[in-house]
């Protein structure tokens, strides 16, 4: 059970996502921490993860992508981009798609962004599409400013509870799903992974 303070009021929540204990809660602003708690509450329908000081270890990237099992069919979705336009998963048919559930206040998520930028730049011409699904509750304008600041060159849309449930539930972030050209889920990781290691997974699918 973790105890945090927001604006002098004590709040207790056992469903804070795993990585929060890696970072000093005292160093977070009240607004940021409030955003964390709101997002945590929104995910309360999922099984509550155990808070830990280390991120769960994702599946080893040493596994050749060609041997990755087919987990299932990727769900269809339509979400709004940061300009309010509809983005449909149908537009990515025939592509290798990386779907990354993230938020601007998530330290491990932010650490992965430069790697995704590099992968999109390197393999976009080969049919790679990275889609960042933001779980921020502060709105598209806030996320848009963040993407500009960090030079994010890939698709970013605003997520909702429905898309998280469609992908089997998002108990922690970052959660990242790798989808092949046939629309099959081939890998799912919870926690951060260095982009060099993740590249080893997706490159054979291109």
Image (cartoon, rainbow, N blue to C red):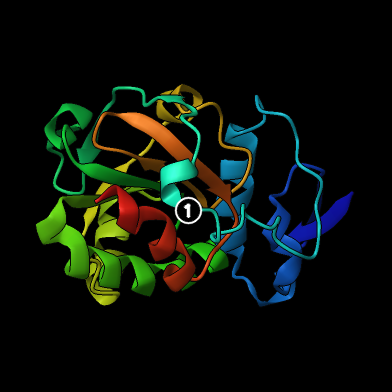
Tell me the residue at 56%/29% (across/down).
169
Residue 153 appears in view? no
| In the displayed structure image, the side of residue 48 where residue 166 appears, left or right | left
| In the displayed structure image, the side of residue 16 where residue 186 appears, left or right | left
Extreme residue toward the right, this view: 1
Q: Which percent across, then down, holds residue 192?
A: 56, 62
> Of 61 and 79, which appears nearest the observer?
61
> Of 197 and 177, which appears nearest the observer?
197
Which structural element holds mark 1? loop
Tell me the residue at 85%/54% (across/down).
2
Q: Is residue 158 above or below residue 203?
A: above
Residue 84 appears in view? yes
Residue that badge 1 annotates: 64
Q: Which percent across, then down, holds residue 166?
A: 44, 22
Q: Is residue 192 above or below residue 17?
A: below
Q: Which percent across, then down, holds residue 187?
A: 48, 42
Q: Is residue 14 above or below residue 25?
A: above
Asked which quadrant contains residue 4, the reply is bottom right
Asked which quadrant contains residue 141, the reply is bottom left
Within 10 Å of the Cα at label 1, are there few (<14), some (14-19), or many (20+) other Cα atoms?
some
Q: Which percent across, then down, holds residue 60?
A: 61, 57
> Of 178 and 40, which appears nearest the observer?
178
| In the displayed structure image, the side of residue 69 where residue 51 appears, left or right | right
> Of 185 and 109, which appears nearest the observer?
185
Tell me the residue at 15%/59% (across/down).
124
Asked which quadrant contains residue 125, the reply is bottom left
Give the number of marks: 1
């Amino acid at each position: 059970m973790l105890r945090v303070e927001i604006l002098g009021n004590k709040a207790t929540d056992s469903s804070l996502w795993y990585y929060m204990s890696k970072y000093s809660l005292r160093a977070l602003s009240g607004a940021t921490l409030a955003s964390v708690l709101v997002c945590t509450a929104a995910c309360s329908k999922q099984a509550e993860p155990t808070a830990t000081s280390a991120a769960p270890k994702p599946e080893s990237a040493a596994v050749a992508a060609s041997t990755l099992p087919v987990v299932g069919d990727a769900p269809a979705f339509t979400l709004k981009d940061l300009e309010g336009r509809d983005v449909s998963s149908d537009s990515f048919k025939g592509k290798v798609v990386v779907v990354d559930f993230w938020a601007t206040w998530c330290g491990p998520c932010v650490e992965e962004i430069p790697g995704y930028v590099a992968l999109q730049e390197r393999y976009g011409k080969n049919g790679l599409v990275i889609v960042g699904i933001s779980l921020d509750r502060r709105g598209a304008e806030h996320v848009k400013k963040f993407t500009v600041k960090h030079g994010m060159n890939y698709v970013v849309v605003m997520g909702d509870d429905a898309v998280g449930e469609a992908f089997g539930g998002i108990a922690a972030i970052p959660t990242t799903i790798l989808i092949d050209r046939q629309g099959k889920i081939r890998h799912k990781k919870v926690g951060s992974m260095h982009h060099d290691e993740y590249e080893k997974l997706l490159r054979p699918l291109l």
